[in-house]
Image (spheres, rainbow, N blue to C red):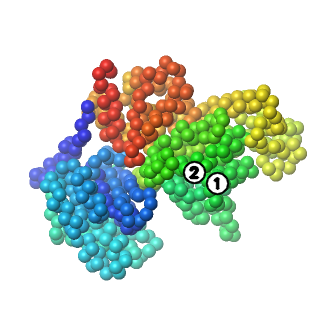
Amino acid sequence: MISDAIDFQEDISTTGHGTNKVLNDFSIQIATVNGSGSQSANTVLLRSIFGMGIPVSGKNLFPSNIAGLPTWYTIRVSRDGWVARKAENDLLIAMNAETAQEDVRSLRAGSAVIYDEGLKLNELRSDVTFYPVPFDKLAAETGADAKIRKLIKNMVYVGVAAQLLSIDMPTAEKAVRQQFAKKQKAADLNWKAVQLGFEYAVANLHKADPFMVEPMNETAGKIIIDGNSAAAMGCMFAGVTVVAWYPITPSSSVVEQLISYMKKHRIEQDGKATFAIVQAEDELAAIGMTLGAGWAGARAMTASSGPGLSLMAEFAGLGYYAELPGVIFDIQRTGPSTGLPTRTSQADLSFIAGLSHGDTKHVLLLPGTVKECFEFGMESFDLAEQLQTPVFVLSDLDIGMNNWMSDPFDYPEKPMQRGKVLTAEDLTRLGGFKRYGDVDGDAIPYRTLPGTDHHAAAYFTRGTGHNEKALYSERPDDYENNMLRLARKFETAATMVPKPILEGTGREKVGILAFGSSHFAIIESREELAREANLATDYLRVRAYPFTKEVHEFIASHDRVYIVEQNRDAQLQGLLKLDLDPAQLTKLRSVLHFNGLPMDALSVTQAISAMEFSEGVSR
């Protein structure tokens, strides 16, 4: 079995002065209250460390209802480049009196706490280093008025942390001025607060914990971005022209960012917009507008989360059956019902795969990085038009709303793929067409766009029974033939969607299979398993549904396959069971994580090692 304290002692090195150091490998948790203005300070702290060339990631755990409730922001500092959530925190910045005692008690021995001196947290434990700070007094010294002081004291803890961790101050100033780039006065005031915190720490705090940063060169050329912003950018590059949406956490920022991008890049010189973004009255109207615009030839999309997708079910079925292109982003959160609306999950997978009544199979794209959010934002529109069907992009709150380090995105070079669209010239040459006929043997029919100037261009778009010519029909053979063609089109889709990515030799006995944001915990867990348990693994990251042949081959070539996913009911495994030969099913084992927190590597390592080394399993 793997212990709960993997690597903690290994991370401690001893300097020539006999002082233990943990360099560039720890986790900071900042505990504040919702609406206190801490987001800017947390971003500055993250970017300050990133600016020193040290890999970082940032995760926000926030309440779902009103201001004043607890919120936590975690910065992982990792010299090895790990960006998944770490199970333990090493440095706590305690700014919330309500949760402070519980936060301190949750720390492991040897951790450190920066706290408001009025909380007297040092009385709670003797195995943790405490740094009391008079935040209100220092905020007052900035000269800001009383209302602003409540916000500015967050920047004070940035300065205190900078001094205790040895963060480069010029780099911190650059981060402050980047955060307030358009507000010189605000930048000056916030930088003054950082300096006051730093100077107080120099004069009054004695460094007694091991956690420090030291410059590296591991972030050169990297960017920090959240998945929703990356997805929005991809949609803009894809040429989206119609967006219909209704706000819902955690998807709202997809469209909010898209609005910002489009206003900057998609306004003509005469001031006219080349796009339409409409806030609909609800999610049902939003997907209706999206599919209507797709039918008319626009590149159209909507974005929502689980409850909104529930409302979209009937229109999703219309899109599938009438064969209408459109892109739907589902930024997953926990359910059922309202569930935990500000927590992450991968529990919409089986729901979206068959969203609608009757026999329905939807194409799903499953980005696992912010770069793929960008890339799939583009590719989804090509696939929707090539396949003439709704395409769903399933991200989640963790990858969508949190800060991730990434390689820059590649500028698109491929032309748009509009699929099988017949022009007036085509119709003259052909003499006509069957809207729902399978001419090419790939089960994808041809379509025309409204306004095509030809007498043979018109057809009825039917959500009722229809034959190849789009004429109303309730004949059993017409219905059966149409449904079988749609099933074949889904098989064609399996040859067009993004292929999975293999990591490893491909020859190990044990395989790991997963999708989405679980990726970061798994790549770290694989190293832990190899180092701590001498267990070599192969890893296949699924990036789309329908499953490609590579998924079936991966399972067939391994003795045991651990399917790691963030839901209770093993939904990825359930979809695989529908595809696989029954002889392969005994190989599958589930590793499930569904508490709403982003997946961490240690949980995966412990779960796999427990099953792998249980009685009766040989290697």
Q: Position of residue 562 (x, y in %)?
A: 40, 30
Compared with 486, 155 (above or below) is below
- Residue pictured at 21% horizontal, 49% vertical: 108
Residue 580 x/y as whole percent: 53, 24
Q: Whole-percent x and y of residue 8?
A: 22, 44
Q: Nearer the viewer, residue 532 or 61?
A: 61
Q: Which residue does the numbered mark 2 point to in the structure image?
A: 308
- How far apart are the alpha carbons under marks 1 and 2? 10 Å
Q: Quadrant of residue 148?
A: bottom left
Say whether residue 442 is visible.
no
Nearest the viewer among 470 and 209 is 470
Numbered mark located on residue 266 in the image: none
Q: Nearer the viewer, residue 585 or 452?
A: 585
Q: Which residue is painted at 52% across and 42% down in the image?
A: 348
Q: Amino acid at mark 1?
A: Ala
Query: Mark number for residue 286?
Result: 1
SS category of the residue bearing label 1: helix
Q: Secondary structure at mark 2?
A: helix
Disc 2 residue type (three-letter): Gly
